Image: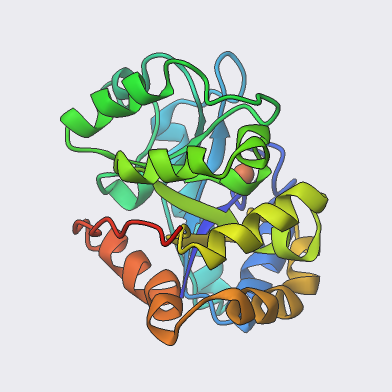
Amino acid sequence: MLDMHCHIIPETDDGAKDMNITLKMGKKASQLGYDCILATSHYIIPNNQLENKEYLERIRKVNKEFEKNDINVTVYPGNEIFFTNDILGLITSKKVCTLANSRYVLIELPLYTRVVPFNVFEEFNKLQDAGYVPVLAHPERYDFVTESISNIYQLIESGVLMQVNIASITGKYGSNAKRNVIRMLKYNMVHFLGTDAHSVSVYSDYKRAMKKIKANIKSEEIYNNIMYGNPSMLLKDLPIPIIYPDM
Ligand SMILES: [Fe+2]
């Protein structure tokens, strides 16, 4: 099982404070059934910019520590890229990592905007023309989704995939995010799940949240795609077919 979104690399962003926390997170993740984690450290211009070489070295070190401590989890490179004008340039100049070196790119938009920022489609198109697939981080948290769920429909229609935070369904990010995630599940608008863990605390309510998520997914087939099918395609860098939401 793959965690699509995790701030597990120590001393890199607002996630794991040190290697000790990283090890605790890895252990907990493994107990919950994860064997793969995408390290999605924030990449926000002008903050949180780490040399790629140094970042990959930190990921390598985490994997080594996991091995030493019998934690059966592999950490793959990635970034949670805060939306900016030249994401393609950041990728091609190797300033940011795609997810597990695949075509998939995790992108975060501003939380508090009631409309989709005007240049999002243009920037996403540029990425798609170059062969990349944008994956939107925690769309349920954005005000423009609360304003109108059809914004998500439009993005999916244009080939963007959706990664929902598991804890949104138990209200960790407020009542709007909770309502949005339930609607997104109902309309089949979710492609990936992630913990967005910044420390060990997010795992404490994990089982209850997963139970609620499962209860809101329409079929076993969709559940299996979200949990296993889509993540496995991502890790193999294979295309995930667009399935239009049922609205
Ligand atoms: Fe995140």
Q: Quadrant of residue 41?
A: top right
Work out whether residue 209 or residue 237 is closer to the camera in this orientation and state it: 209
Q: How is the image coloured?
A: rainbow
Quadrant for ligand 1 reads top right
Marks counted in the figure total 0
**In the image, what residue occupies the spot 45% across and 74% down?**
227
Work out whether residue 67 or residue 169 is closer to the camera in this orientation and state it: 169
Relative side of 113 to 120, left or right: right
Q: Position of residue 146 (x, y in %)?
A: 67, 41
**In the image, what residue occupies the spot 42% across and 23% down?**
120
Residue extending farthest to the front is 247
Vertical arrangement, residue 221 with respect to residue 170, above or below: below
Q: Is residue 20 visible?
A: no
Q: Quadrant of residue 56?
A: top left
Q: Position of residue 196 (x, y in %)?
A: 63, 53
Vertical arrangement, residue 201 with respect to residue 28, above or below: above
**In the image, what residue occupies the spot 20% across and 56% down?**
239
Q: Is residue 193 visible?
A: yes
Relative side of 40 to 27, left or right: left
Relative side of 190 to 214, left or right: left
Q: Position of residue 115 (x, y in %)?
A: 58, 24
Vertical arrangement, residue 87 with respect to residue 64, above or below: above
**In the image, what residue occupies the spot 40% across and 39% down?**
155
Vertical arrangement, residue 208 with respect to residue 42, above or below: below
Q: Position of residue 168 (x, y in %)?
A: 71, 58
Relative side of 162 to 130, left or right: right
Work out whether residue 182 or residue 23 is closer to the camera in this orientation and state it: 182
